[in-house]
């Protein structure tokens, strides 16, 4: 099973390295958000303790990269189905669970690589200060990526149309992002918004990354870590179940 998972993961990595334009396209928008929104809003948004807004925003931009890259990785299932590769791999002696795990790990790896590139850029620009928290932030990046790759695969496995998949993704991505606290402190929002944010995996991902990198977080890091572990395991298992049922 490990060999099967590795083969599917390796295919996702080969596809990623052959489409280098994906790196530029996935980093361009977050980079402009970091610079223009971070600098533009920084003078008008006052954070507790006098913290710099652009420092507060940077972990949220990392979460944005992970969200967009991870959840749209589900489109690989649509491509594989359209061009017949999925049919070929399904008749091979490979379990459906191995396919899901390989694609999930592949999509998560791509998302984390993109986030790490932005992390290096932000550090070089002086937006983020280097430190040991980087290692902890990578753990939160991985768990967040696993959550949203799983969501992308769950939706993609139930869709027949690539246009329909993109429409649904566009519909759910922005609420997930804006309700995560990536752009503003959640403690300053109405109670109903905070209640919805508690059900958003990206909330804990961004909060964990922010706490690890700049030392400011809404929840203790162990809560962020525990909740993300729970979300990751539940979504991967649910995704594997739906994939097996839809491809049987």
Image (cartoon, rainbow, N blue to C red):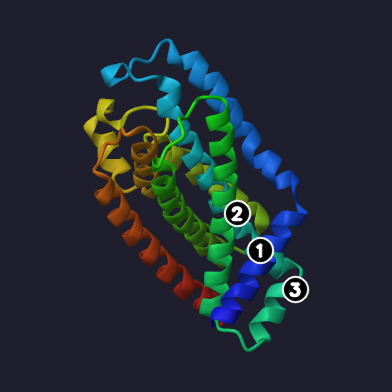
Please identify the quadrant where the C terminus is shown: bottom right
- Name which of mark 1 and mark 2 comes first in the sequence: 1
Q: Name the residue under label 3.
A: 84
Marks 1 and 2 in Cβ contact (< 8 Å): yes
Mark 2 vs mark 3, foreground winner is 2
The answer to whether residue 247 shows anywhere in this view is no
Q: Residue at x 45, y 49 (%)?
A: 138
The residue tagged with tag 1: helix, strand or loop? helix
Mark-to-mark CA distance, 1 and 2: 8 Å
Please give left or right for residue 189 compared with residue 11 in the image.
left
Q: Residue at x 60, y 26 (%)?
A: 32
Q: Quadrant of residue 164?
A: bottom right
Q: Mark 2 points at which residue?
A: 110
Q: Name the residue under label 1.
A: 12
Marks 1 and 3 in Cβ contact (< 8 Å): no
**Residue 56 x/y as whole percent:** 40, 27
Q: Residue at x 47, y 58 (%)?
A: 146
Q: Is residue 85 above or below residue 119?
A: below
Q: In this view, does 189 lie above or below 161?
A: above
């Amino acid at each position: 099973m490990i060999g099967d998972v590795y083969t599917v993961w390796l295919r996702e990595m080969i596809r990623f390295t052959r489409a280098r334009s994906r790196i530029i396209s996935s980093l361009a928008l977050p980079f402009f958000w970091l610079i223009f929104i971070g600098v533009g809003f920084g003078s008008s948004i006052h954070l507790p303790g006098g913290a710099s807004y652009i420092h507060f925003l940077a972990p949220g931009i990392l979460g944005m990269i992970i969200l967009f890259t991870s959840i749209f990785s589900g489109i690989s299932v649509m491509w594989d189905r359209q061009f017949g590769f999925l049919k070929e791999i399904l008749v091979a002696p490979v379990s459906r669970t191995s396919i899901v795990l390989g694609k999930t790990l592949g999509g998560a790896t791509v998302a984390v690589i993109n986030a790490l590139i932005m992390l290096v850029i932000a550090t070089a620009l002086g937006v983020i200060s280097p430190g040991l928290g980087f290692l902890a932030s990578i753990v939160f990046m991985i768990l967040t990526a696993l959550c949203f790759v799983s969501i992308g695969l769950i939706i993609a496995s139930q869709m027949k149309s690539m246009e329909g998949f993109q429409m649904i993704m566009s519909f759910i991505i922005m609420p997930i992002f804006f309700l995560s606290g990536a752009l503003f402190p959640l403690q300053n929002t109405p109670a109903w918004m905070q209640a919805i944010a508690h059900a958003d995996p990206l909330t804990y991902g961004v909060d964990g990354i922010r706490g690890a990198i700049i030392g400011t977080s809404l929840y203790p890091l162990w809560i962020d870590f525990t909740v993300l572990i729970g979300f990751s395991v539940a979504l991967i298992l649910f995704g594997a179940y739906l994939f097996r049922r839809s491809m049987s």
